[in-house]
Amino acid sequence: MKKWRKIIPALLSACLLAGCGVAQKDDSVYRVSMVAGTGGINDQSFNQLSWEGLQRFGAHSGADVRVLESKQASDYLTNIDRATDTYSDLVWALGYSLADPMLTIAKMNPDINFAIVDYGFDESPHNVTGVVFRAQESSFLVGYIAGMTTQTDKVGYVGPMKSFLNDQFQYGYIGGVAYAAHVRGREIEVQSQFTESYSDAAKAKAIANKMYSNGCDIIFHSAGGAGYGVIESAKENGKYVIGVDTDQSYLAPDNVLTSGMKNVDIAVDLVSTMAMEGEEIGGQTYSYGLKEGCVGIPAENPLLAPEIYEKAMEIQEMIVQGELVPPLSEETCQAFVEGL
Amino acid sequence: MEKTVKIRKKPIAAILLAIFCGFVVATVILAASGYHPLEAFGALLSGIFGRPKYVSNVIIKSTPIILTGVSVAFAYKMGLFNIGAEGQFIVGAVAANIVGIVCDFPAIIEIPLVLAVGAAAGALYGGIAGWLKAKYHINEVIVGIMLNWIALYLSNFVCNIERFHKPDSDGTYAIHESGFLTFFTNWKTTEAAAEFVRNHPVAGDILRTDANAGILIAVALTFAVSSLLYKTTKGYELRAVGSNRDAAEFAGINVGKNMVQTMLIAGALSGIAASICIAGNNPHGISQLSAFESNGLNGLSVAFIAGGSPIGCIFAGLLFGGLLYGGQSIQYMVGAPSEIINILIGTIVFLIALKDMVPVLVDKLGKRGVKS
């Protein structure tokens, strides 16, 4: 019994000491916290890239950067709330699923800046920043490359599910293919199908197998983790596939023609730097594309014919200059194709 | 010496020892990977007790796993291993979500309706496994695992039905507000509430979380299950089947019927855990699942840590919820990978599986004590 009398106060004081460990307010350090989605910061994709971007920002700016992973959708709200407890100056939320919870917390903390990747609010509150990507621009480029490369005049597209975000990939790609078809003076068919999931690689593989046997020789996917199934299928069928988000050629060096990259890390670094330098970033949505180097295709494409790469670079320049506006939705795509 | 031996023979001693050893293993791993273990555990503790709202969040996080733990513990008492708790939880969530979106009644009807429908869905789902086991002697573990996957894909299917899918998100609509279990749902967003939060640091802090009545329901149900098991004839029958099936049958107990009933109740407990989550926590809906959220699977660990006692599940569930919620702080404050907390939990569960060895060891220790 005597022992317990000693242990309990010791435990209590340990708790108190631990309580003191909570970050103290210190104006000399700029603090940025990031709340990741359920994919986790080792997802080889969106979350990991964003966290790498923030770490890079921390390294060159000396800011204090932290990350919180969400395990379930019900963690979003509590985690974003948790991120405000450490006197953060800026809180990042990753992915559009976090938009609603972030808005709730942002309203409760008017003094903290909040930024979200892949979502733009129609009307951002003064302390909320949206960061979106003009993924239609990189998708247009890879669509153009697919259209120029295809031998069978049939190409495929595998998407996750219909959403405003994914329309950029799908219709940007279709627009690019149509442009190439126009240049080559022939009809190129685009077969599109959805996996209805970001994770169901088996289904994506089945879809890709079907497309390849239907005569497609190139498939572009924007299905996140499910897309590995498409790449797998390309390997087995010996056909071309176009990767997404990062340069995916390391997954299948003999099959990945190119990749429609979305450099979330650059955008996270960029916006964090602006916020730290005192720029007013709240109340607006930043849109990043080819011009800012936030989307694009890799510089090295061993499988790609050099002359097609050259032409693609010309197209890229036209998009950067605003001479060519890639479609980003069904309507704009229709108008674009008719206008060719 | 004899007295300490006696204390150490109690099951609680083995459990505490396992928890302690879990921390030792985590300490070694943290130190080996270059993090300061004390700092990490400090972050863990402050992540649990540091602010009133953290405590509130721990309780919210614990509520469903207490119930799935009780579900597993209950089935275990009759010799069934309810690994299907995960699937029962998922279908419970789906059903509660659907009914909460479709129906819009006053709170007095809506809340019980959402809870009851979730429980009923879980019960039916659990009942399938029980019935197959009773009628065709199909192993409930295999059936449970298969049904878990069916539930996962069913949930994703419902998630994508246009009637329920919330545009530009990967989840469903929230249920109607009348179905919310959260305290002061409407009042929270008012100016008066903001004023209250400013003036009452403790209560206001808690108010910022999804504090809800779920924990009260969970505790009440736990006590109900406990008295069902130990105070009623039905409970006696169930335990009799659990201890010796053949003897129970010989004594005139209908084993098959009891099996189905057990799984119905166990399923209902998991189902109601899910409907409490839907009614109690943001986002009040389901999301596209790429893997199990482990509300049911964690229930297995909780029941295990609790030594199969329903009341023990309350404490084990709180411990588990605390580790899960507070554990995130290790990553956030110290930067250690979030997996460390899974290693800690895994070690605890593993050592508890070995806990029957502790009394044996203590016995030897006691004998040595007598000799000297």
Image (cartoon, rainbow, N blue to C red):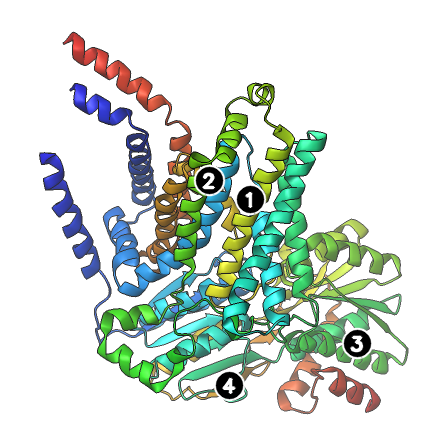
Q: Amino acid at mark 2?
A: Leu
Q: Amino acid at mark 3?
A: Val
Question: Is residue A128 in view from this perspective?
Answer: yes
Q: Is residue B204 left or right of residue A54?
A: left
Query: Up-down: is B113 above or below A251?
Result: below
* Residue A287 point in image, percent of width and height: 55, 84
Q: Could you say which is closer to the camera, residue B236 or residue A93?
A: B236
The reply to whether callout 1 and callout 2 are in contact (CB within 8 Å) is yes
Q: Secondary structure at mark 3?
A: helix
Residue that numbered label 4 is attached to: A285
The subunit carrying tag 3 is A
Mark 2 to mark 3: distance in Å? Answer: 68 Å
* Residue B300 point in image, percent of width and height: 48, 41
The subunit carrying tag 1 is B
* Residue A226 point in image, percent of width and height: 67, 58
Q: Is residue B53 left or right of residue B60?
A: left
Query: Up-down: is B124 above or below A282?
Result: above
Residue that numbered label 2 is attached to: B228
Q: Is residue B359 left or right of residue A334?
A: left
Discs 4/2, front: 2
Q: Amino acid at mark 4?
A: Thr
